[in-house]
Image (tube, rainbow, N blue to C red):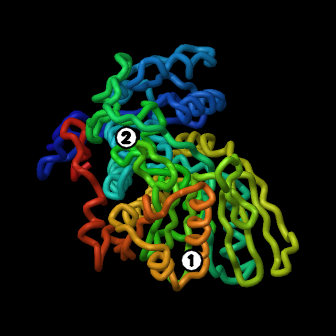
Amino acid sequence: MAVQLNRRDVIRGGLAAGATVVLPKSRVLGANDDIRIAIMGCGVMGGGHIKKFDRLPGVRVVAVSDPDLTRMDGKTASLSHKPEKHQDFRRILDDKNVDAVVIATPNHWHSPMAIMACQAGKHAYVQKPVSHNIWEGRKMVEAARKYDRLVQAGTQHRSCPGVAEAAKDIQSGKFGKVLWVHCLILNLRESIGKVSTPQSIPAHIDYDLWCGPAPKTPVMRQSFHYDWHWQWNWGDGEMGNWGPHYIDDVRHILGWDDVPQSVIAAGSRSVWDDNGETPNMHVALFQRDGINVVVDVRNLPRQAGTTEAATYMGLEHGNVFVCESGIVKINLDGGQAYDQDGALVKEYKSNLGLHEANFIKALHSGQRSDLNAEIEIGHLSTTMCHMANISYRVGQQATVDEIEQSMQEHEDAQETIRAIVGQIDANDGDLVATPLVLGPRLDFDRVAEKFSGPHAEDANRLLSYEMRNSYAVPDVV
């Protein structure tokens, strides 16, 4: 006999042995049915999704939610109709008139909300990074499978024809064997400022709900919104912010269906004396089956007093694939392929406006295979970001020589360390007052999704975190 459990019971306590979940009823969508979408989170990304989804033929944004009551009105003002507004997103999950949700909240809510949506019979589109840690990301994949829901990761490059064409060319051997890859995010940021006492919470924000499963600690930052990205309780730094896009491109273009076997990372939060915790200069070296991938993240300007970003082979962001008979450069603006002599041999066109439509197409077909960024793809790409962060977080202060020595088997990684040191110096940084941190080389068991070998005990503590009971993801989703 099936045991009927409500969503809150499942999310709080898991399932008793032998119990069977009865999936909440949801509409069977036909080819001509309107898709009714709800947007969870009305910040920058959520506001963009409200417009993009509502403009798609046959799609209506019927509800929005945000713990901050002031953020919903402005983001829905352009709509011709008035969607329902809920401070508590759980009201949306209880609404049988909602077919799918778009999750554009702070990172720590991405996986828990997606799991709850699946349990409530909703399909989901989950912004990057799709998880705040590796464990909950896998639980999200399990929930999508168990409840047979379509869940799309918000990595828009997966629907870009240019990236797909580059993947086809490189995997076919058009430019010979891939020797190594340099993935770069050299975008400028500014210090988030520094406060020495906890900041007050505006009355229009439900802070308990905003924190959800994450620690409900005092707010120690000048700006309540967005700057949580740079504090570990809620954010994952630039590695988890822009990293999922370009790291996913690496996996896509190389044809990987898993993640690397090892990672080593180094960096620091340099120059800025602020409340941020995540590194603004961060390099990670991944290794998988003989291919080295350097992920190069830098938020400082090229030098003090300028508003110019650093560059790598002429790019400020994107990927460079160094092959036996050529080089392929590609980013969100498109890309180019060059032969060994540096002559342009091919261009790749960008179109980043197709991803939301791909999600709607899959909802109509009901086929998981129609999703360009099915949630396990997003989970694995986000896992690489977490791997890089974990190596950094369990690291220790080190000299530049020690860091270079740790990456001696790959010259591009060593050159990246030198570039980082030079850029810190050009911004009047002090490596004595704020030394670089060197993380250990971590081996990753790709089946168990755990670290093994030396330093595994420390690293595995960061695979998840102790969630607050009322919002915790259960072991059995």
Helix, strand or loop at mark 2: helix
Against 221, is 144 above or below? Answer: below
For label 1, count other residues whose C-alpha is less than 10 Å away and answer few (under 14), some (14-19) or many (20+). many
Residue 122, how many percent across, how many down? 40, 37
Q: In which quarter of the image is residue 98?
A: top left
Residue at the location (31% across, 71% down)?
Answer: 451
Against 400, is 69 above or below? Answer: above
Disc on the earlier residue, 2 or 1: 2
Please name whichever residue, 50 or 56, is drawn nearer the observer in this view of the structure.
50
Q: In which quarter of the image is residue 326?
A: bottom right
Residue 37, how many percent across, how many down? 50, 30
Helix, strand or loop at mark 1: helix
Reading the image, the residue beneath label 2 is 109
Please name whichever residue, 88 or 432, is drawn nearer the observer in this view of the structure.
432
Q: Which amino acid does label 1 sit on?
A: Gln
| Side (left or right) of 327 relative to 452 | right
Quadrant showing the N terminus:
top left
Against 204, is 5 above or below? Answer: below
| Side (left or right) of 197 relative to 363 | left
Residue at the location (23% across, 34% down)?
Answer: 8
For label 2, count other residues whose C-alpha is less than 10 Å away and answer few (under 14), some (14-19) or many (20+). many
Please name whichever residue, 26 or 220, is drawn nearer the observer in this view of the structure.
220
Reading the image, the residue beneath label 1 is 414
What is the CA distance from the residue labelled 2 to the residue labelled 1? 36 Å
Residue at the location (59% across, 72% down)?
Answer: 418
Please name whichever residue, 266 or 400, is drawn nearer the observer in this view of the structure.
400
